């Protein structure tokens, strides 16, 4: 028997095997599931043999749904919140409900699982010690470029979500704003059949994507390497990765010296990068 609470349950981002046993158990045991799109989630429910009642909760009815959910919790029942894919509230509805339910003194319990951008960060080879998650970029190119400009000097890895309709246009805007030398990774169709993770200089990445229209299909996470050494020479992802490994074991000066021997880059540049990191 579940303790009465709102359970925020992550679901897979493609591969159904990523559904956790705990997620299945919670969805089976709650009295009500608030789902972003009930028809979409009905397929997931059928796959896992879950027959709990579903109600919709999306960006247009979140405020009204607080009342329904609180009413259930007051009667001692439990409720789960799910979105179409991944973790609710992450570029998905749910914030209003979670905030409202907490404000009324009820427990909110996370049941963690997939998040597309965490999966992308874990495999793309860009620095993950510090990053900023920006979610979706504006749809219109002028607003998009304006938004990107605020990250030109951002030293942390910058993470975006993007759709297949805008992926190429967004990468081209990035090239204008960040320059073609900036290392960028695209993580496409994660956990699905056509999963592709490619990290390269932006200009080469665009050329590669343009040459194969299949690479423009599906769902995307875009990771932009943080800015390095203002005005100075740019270090690529491999050089930084090498430096990071050495920095884990050695003081900055020794790490820079060894990294210079390995990469052929200037020690001064690597030392400054080591200090920045
Ligand atoms: N709540 C989700 C999460 O936890 O990641 C994100 C939902 S958001 C509406 C959908 C966006 O997430 C997609 O447009 C894409 O940018 C990203 N995304 C979701 N699934 C993905 C996948 N399998 N591969 C790559 N990106 C994915």
Image (tube, rainbow, N blue to C red):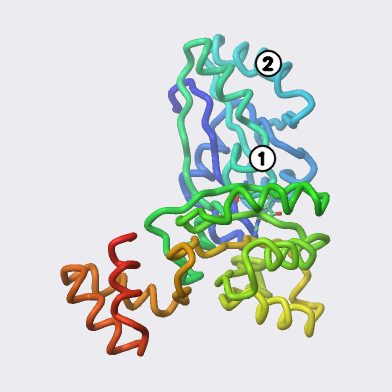
Left or right of 138 on screen, residue 224: left
Q: Position of residue 75 (x, y in %)?
A: 56, 10
Depth order, front residue of 100/169: 169
- Closer-to-camera residue (32/226): 226
- Classed neighbour count for the residue bearing mark 1: other residues with Cα under 10 Å, few (<14), some (14–19), many (≥20): some
Q: Nearer the viewer, residue 76 or 5?
A: 5
Q: Position of residue 194 (x, y in %)?
A: 68, 75
Indicate which label's residue lies in the foreground, 2 or 1. 1
Query: How packed is label 2: few (under 14 Cα within 10 Å), some, or many (20 or more)?
Result: some
Residue lying at 42% horizontally and 79% vertically, measured from the top left:
238
The picture quadrant where one finds residue 128 is: bottom left
Residue 117 appears in the picture as rendered: no
Q: Residue at x 63, y 24 (%)?
A: 96
- The residue positioned 67% from the left and 12% from the top of the image is 67
Q: Residue furthest front?
A: 231
Image quadrant in which the C terminus is located? bottom left
**Which numbered disc covers residue 263?**
none
Residue picked out by circle 2? 68
- Mark 1 residue CB less than 8 A from any atom of ligand 1: yes
Place of residue 159 in the rendered image (x, y in percent of width and height, measured from the top left): 57, 55
Question: Which quarter of the rendered picture does the N terminus lie within?
Answer: top left
Residue 127 at least partly seen: yes
Looking at the picture, how far across and down is residue 179, in whole percent? 63, 69
Instruction: Classify residue 277 as left or right of residue 4.
Output: left
Element type at marker 1? loop
Q: Quadrant of ligand 1?
A: bottom right
Residue, disc 1: 92
The CA span between labels 2 and 1 is 20 Å
The residue at the point 79 percent across, 64 percent down is 169
Left or right: 156 with respect to 42? left
- Disc with the residue nearer the chain's start (2 vs 1): 2
């Amino acid at each position: 028997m579940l303790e009465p609470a709102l359970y925020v349950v992550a679901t897979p981002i493609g591969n159904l095997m990523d559904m956790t046993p705990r997620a299945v158990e919670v969805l089976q045991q709650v009295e009500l599931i608030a789902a972003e799109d009930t028809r979409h989630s009905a397929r997931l429910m059928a796959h896992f043999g879950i027959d709990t009642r579903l109600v919709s909760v999306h960006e247009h009815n979140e405020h009204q749904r607080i009342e329904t959910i609180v009413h259930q919790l007051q009667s001692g029942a439990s409720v789960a919140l799910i979105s179409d894919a991944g973790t609710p509230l992450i570029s998905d509805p749910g914030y209003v409900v979670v905030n409202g339910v907490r404000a009324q003194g009820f427990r909110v319990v996370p049941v963690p699982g997939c998040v597309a951008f965490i999966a992308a960060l874990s495999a793309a080879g860009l620095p993950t010690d510090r990053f900023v998650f920006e979610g979706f970029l504006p749809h219109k190119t002028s607003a998009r470029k304006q938004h990107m400009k605020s990250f030109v000097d951002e030293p942390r890895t910058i993470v975006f979500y993007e759709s297949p309709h805008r992926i190429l246009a967004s990468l081209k805007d990035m090239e204008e704003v960040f320059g073609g030398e900036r290392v960028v990774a695209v993580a496409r169709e994660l956990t699905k059949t056509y999963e592709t993770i490619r990290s390269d200089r932006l200009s080469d990445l665009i050329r590669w994507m343009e040459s194969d229209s299949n690479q423009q299909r599906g769902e995307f996470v875009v990771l932009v390497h943080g800015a390095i050494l203002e005005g100075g020479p740019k270090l690529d992802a491999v050089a930084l990765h090498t430096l990071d490994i050495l920095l884990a074991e050695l003081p900055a000066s020794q790490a820079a010296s060894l990294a210079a021997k390995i990469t052929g880059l200037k020690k001064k540049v690597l030392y400054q990068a080591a200090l920045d990191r």
